[in-house]
Image (spheres, grey):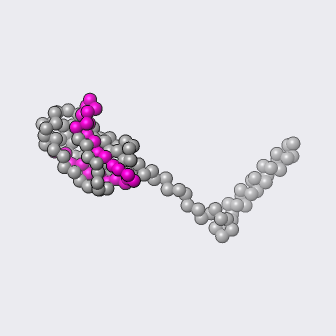
Amino acid sequence: MKNFLLYITFMILFVSVHASQLDGKQNPFANQTQPDSTNVFDIQKLKLYPNPASDHIFIEYDVIYVKEAKLQIYNSIGAIVYTKTLEEKQDNLRISVSDYKNGLYFCSLQIDGKLLNTKKILINH
């Protein structure tokens, strides 16, 4: 049994060393590229300014989506105070916050029904 295990170990070692020395023409797997590790959700961009805001806030976004993208602003107890379905995949929005009460708000970006990014906004008049 020991001889058999030794033989199998030797064959695995021999094949792996020999395969690593092959050039791309003999080894069909040598030129395969690794799959792109960039997650679609990682490249979504959301930028808010000025923060803290008093009269208005600018929201810049650059998103990739399949079906729909939505931007929502919540107050500190979770009530939605602003919502917009994003028609463009890249844009700058100007939102008036002069009617909002002072406090902490959250701006969330949802792509195809999944919450991707949330930023804090402080409103201080």
* Residue with the most extreme top position: 77
Q: Residue at x 19, y 40 (%)?
A: 52
Q: Is residue 116 visible?
A: no
Task: Please state if 38 lies on the left or on the right of 25 as rendered.
Answer: left
Task: Please state if 37 lies on the left or on the right of 103 as rendered.
Answer: right
* Residue with the most extreme front position: 67
Number of numbered markers: 0
Q: Residue at x 20, y 32 (%)?
A: 103
Task: Please state if 102 lies on the left or on the right of 61 as rendered.
Answer: left
Task: Please state if 96 lies on the left or on the right of 106 as rendered.
Answer: left
Query: Viewer-proximal residue, 32 or 101?
Result: 101
Image spot of residue 20 (x, y percent): 68, 60
Q: Is 67 inside the magenta-drawn segment?
A: yes
Q: To which quarter of the image does residue 19 belong?
A: bottom right
Relative to 39, say whether 122 is above or below: above
Q: Is residue 71 visible?
A: yes
Q: Is 1 inside the magenta-drawn segment?
A: no
Image spot of residue 39 (x, y percent): 45, 50
Image spot of residue 35 (x, y percent): 53, 56
Query: Viewer-proximal residue, 38 or 113?
Result: 113
Q: Residue at x 87, y 42 (%)?
A: 1
Relative to 53, say whether 91 is above or below: below
Query: Viewer-proximal residue, 65 or 47?
Result: 65
The residue segment tinted magenta is: 56-81
Q: Residue at x 16, y 44 (%)?
A: 96
Quarter placement of the C terminus: top left
Query: Viewer-proximal residue, 70 or 36?
Result: 70
* Residue with the most extreme bottom position: 25
Relative to 15, say whether 113 is above or below: above
